[in-house]
Image (cartoon, grey):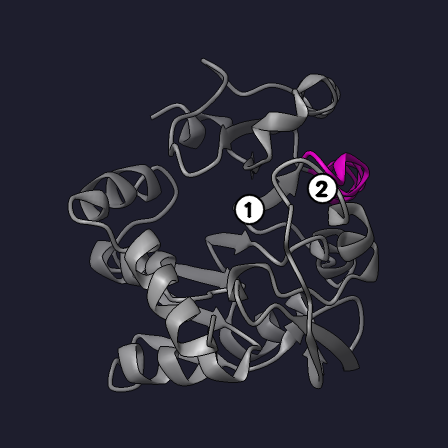
Amino acid sequence: MTTARAIGRSLRIYYPPGRAAALDDFHRRFLGPGDLAFDIGAHVGDRTASFRRIGARVVAVEPQPRLARLMRLLFGRDPGVARVAALVGAAPGEAVLRLNTANPTVATASTDFIAAADGAPGWEDQAWDTEIALPVTTLDALIAAHGVPDFVKIDVEGYEAVALAGLSAAPRTLSFEFTTIQRGVALDCLDRLTALGYRAFNACLGESMEFAHAAPVDAAAMAGWITALPVEANSGDVYAVTEPARARR
């Protein structure tokens, strides 16, 4: 499959008819008009589009060159979206991004992620066939340039803990993706967020946009829940808040 066809498939997956309203309703738990969101790993921009429909300003970070061009086409004339074509890591510099031509959703800067996917159920036939050296920024650097966000979404395929290592103070709300092939990365993220001061957590499986817990839980309970998930659960997102009431609205 060509990269263009693969991106077209991603657009169909992430912009299906009727999804926008549910996505917006979910994100209103964390964002309102005039707030600032960071979309780390913006991919085809469905989260950025949702944040903008809510009225939030967005810093959209997408390192893949073809997807960065797509983000320019989608949001290049929107003054409420600042686009950054870089990886997000622990320190400024440069890193290698491994590209999956047939499935650009899972491009990664983590060789451990690629090793964990090898032979894992649900990850059959995935191949990272190209690599490119790209600049690395940090969450702290993005905050210095754009301001303190009200919500940070991180989806960087196994590089989440590395990205969080470049954050020194807790934004109000933050989410990170986890996978059942790399549960240790999720536990490292929970440890980092606890050190930053987060105390309340919830999670969604896949693209459900439905919380798995009726009320926020602590980091230990979230770690236990992730550890106990069947491998078939595949992936999800953990939401951490500094104001627990915001996760219950």
Q: Position of residue 121 (x, y in %)?
A: 67, 35
- Pointer 2: residues within 10 angstroms few (<14), some, or many (20+)? many
Question: Which residue appears at 50% of the width and 16% of the height?
Answer: 213
Residue 7 is marked as none
Alpha carbon distance from label 1 to label 2: 9 Å
Tell me if residue 100 comes above or below residue 86 in the rendering: above
Residue closest to the eye, 44 or 140: 44
Question: Which residue appears at 64% of the width and 41% of the height?
Answer: 178
Q: Which quadrant of the figure has residue 138? A: bottom right
- Pointer 1: residues within 10 angstroms few (<14), some, or many (20+)? many
Q: Give yes or no for residue 74 being in the magenta stretch.
A: no
Q: Which quadrant of the figure has residue 21? A: top left
The overriding secondary structure of the stretch rendered in magenta is helix
In the displayed structure, does residue 241 sit left or right of residue 138? left
Q: Is residue 65 among the parts visible in the rendering?
A: yes
Pointer 1 residue: 174
In the displayed structure, does residue 97 sit left or right of residue 243? right
Pointer 2 residue: 193
Question: Which residue appears at 30% of the width and 75% of the height?
Answer: 80
Give the magenta range. Answer: 180-197
Q: Is residue 241 among the parts visible in the rendering?
A: no
Residue closest to the eye, 109 or 52: 109
Q: Give yes or no for residue 195 being in the magenta stretch.
A: yes
Instruction: Say whether disc 1 or disc 2 marks the residue closer to the N-terminus.
Output: 1
Question: Which structural element holds mark 1?
Answer: strand
